[in-house]
Image (spheres, grey):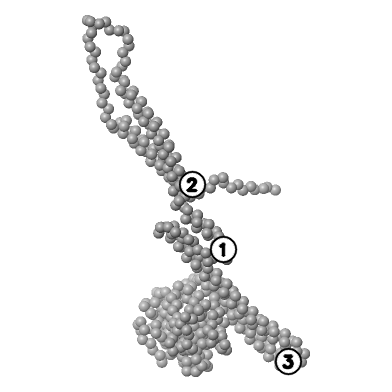
Amino acid sequence: MRTLFLTRPIARWTVRLRLTLLYGGLVLGTGALLLGLTYVLMDHVLPFIQVEPPARPNLRDTITPPTLPMPDLQDGPAQQRAEDMRQFLTASALALVVMTFVSAGLGWAVAGRVLRPLRTIITTARDITVRYLHRRLDVRGPDDEIKDLTDTINGLLDRLEAAFEAQQAFVANASHELRTPLTFERSLLEITLADPDVSAQDLRAVCERVLAGNQSQERVIEALLTLARSQRGLDQLHGLDLAKAAATVLGSTREHAAARGLRLETRLDEACTSGDPTLVERLVANLVDNAVRHNTAEGGWVRVRTGLDAGRPTLWVSNSGPVIPADQVGSLFEPFRRLVTARTGQEGGSGLGLSIVAAIAAAHDSQLDARALPEGGLRVRISFGVEEPRNCASPRSVETEPEMRLGRGRHQAEV
């Protein structure tokens, strides 16, 4: 059996060490270049004037010259110049070495000062966990790249905190939505089985109620799967027409709306876009179902329209209904959020319809605008991306109900 020993490097090549070596190397290189240029200039460029020695006096007649050796005055200045250049080179080299060490020390100190905010960021980021996502990086200083990095990380932490809170709320709500019917069904079965005199008709009624509850749970689970698929994003994009998708949905919704005494008013003009046709149809179906379900008992209306708004393919769905507080409109698109009036009614849904709409719209990079109508009800507008008309296979205009004709222009948003 072989044992592998993993050795940790003795010295890490940290950013501070690399910056220090870079500063020192730059000083050493530029200093050596400056020294070389100075030496070349002093040796070859600067003029050197030789001084001629004076002529020997003629003293033969008066004094007998000594027989001492006379130095060669012609080679003296050249030797002195070479010696001076050698001393200059030696002193400059020593000064360069000293300045290199001094610059390395200064570089180490400056690099530490510059990288201090990064160490603060690293220390704080290591301490941030799921339980402490509310903490943020507090790095003060000039408005530079490090400040931009801090703001970016803080923004990322904001999004992570919001995502974790939404996930926790979603899990809690989903558990409640699934556990409550199961508890009810179990209690219903236990009470029925505990009665020794229960009849076959009572058992059949209990089974039908359990089956209805099971179907409701199945719809909730299907909605959860659709929501997860929408939040995952789109794998492929296909050309589609919002008018065709709306016409498909309205074909199966008209009878439901008529049974509730609602007036369905539609105007479907060509609106070519790109996306997932199945998810877009589910988006339209959820909006229309929500408009039909949360409406007035009699004399209500539902309006569905497709077309172009400022050049963008747009879907409008509006309906009459109870008055919705303006500050609660945004919460309707959160999972398992319902109005108080809808929670006590018999037509309450799973609480996932509009959250699926928001997820599908976000997956298609669409703009979703929802506003409460003053007289009651809700108006939802979703603007998709523009698609080339040649990729739109639907007819130019599909009118399913000519009784309502809406004008074009900016007032389209007032549907």
Q: Which mark is residue 129?
A: 1
For the residue marked with disc 3, what is the amino acid? Answer: Ala
Between 284 and 202, the one lying in front of the other is: 202
Q: Quadrant of residue 344?
A: bottom right
Q: Could you tell me residue 308's position as x and y percent?
A: 38, 80
Is disc 3 placed on a helix, strand or loop? Answer: helix
Q: Could you tell me residue 33's position as x and y percent?
A: 37, 38
Q: Can residue 66 be seen here?
A: yes
Between 352 and 30, the one lying in front of the other is: 30
Q: Quadrant of residue 183?
A: bottom right
Is disc 2 placed on a helix, strand or loop? Answer: helix
Indicate which disc, 3 or 1, sits on the residue closer to the N terminus. 1
Q: Residue at x 35, y 38 (%)?
A: 34
For the residue marked with disc 2, what is the amino acid? Answer: Leu
Indicate which disc, 2 or 3, sits on the residue closer to the N terminus. 2
**Where the C terminus falls, by quadrant?**
bottom left
